[in-house]
Amino acid sequence: EPHPLAGLSFDGIAAVGSLVKGGKSNALSGASLTQGAGFQGASGIFRLRRDGTNERALAVATIRNSRVVVLDPAPRGFGGAGF
């Protein structure tokens, strides 16, 4: 069973890999790391904010009759109301 922090570790490496893949000399600058579009992570999209916090686009679900029912699927990108 993966450690609870494994997803966060994956997300960090995915963000760095995504930026470095572009080949720009400023790939790991503060501006690049806090870009508004965010990154695709292990549990969905996320973005790093300039104030040191992060934002994640998550689904909202409930349990009905012993089954998970998605009430509101996770957004695929940032930019709509609330983001």
Image (cartoon, grey):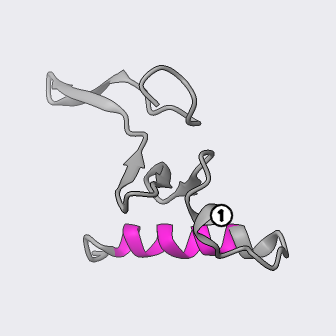
Residue 14's x, y, as percent? 59, 69
Q: Is residue 42 left or right of residue 70?
A: right
- Is 15 part of what is drawn in magenta? yes
Residue 6's x, y, as percent? 36, 74
Of 43 and 47, nearer the camera is: 47
Q: Residue at x 58, y 68 (%)?
A: 30
Secondary structure of residue under mark 1: helix
The quadrant holding residue 7 is bottom left
Q: Is residue 32 left or right of residue 82?
A: right
Q: Residue at x 45, y 33 (%)?
A: 74
Instruction: From the image, tell me which residue sits under label 1.
Output: 32
Single out the residue that lies furthest toward the right.
23
- Circle 1 residues within 10 Å: few <14, some 14–19, many ≥20: some
Q: Is residue 3 left or right of residue 10?
A: left
Residue 8's x, y, as percent? 38, 69
**The residue stretch that appears in magenta:** 6-18
Of 76 and 36, nearer the camera is: 36
- Is 3 part of what is drawn in magenta? no
Of 61 and 12, nearer the camera is: 12
Q: Is residue 74 left or right of residue 53?
A: right
Up-down relation of residue 54 to residue 73 (above or below): below
Q: Amino acid at mark 1?
A: Ser
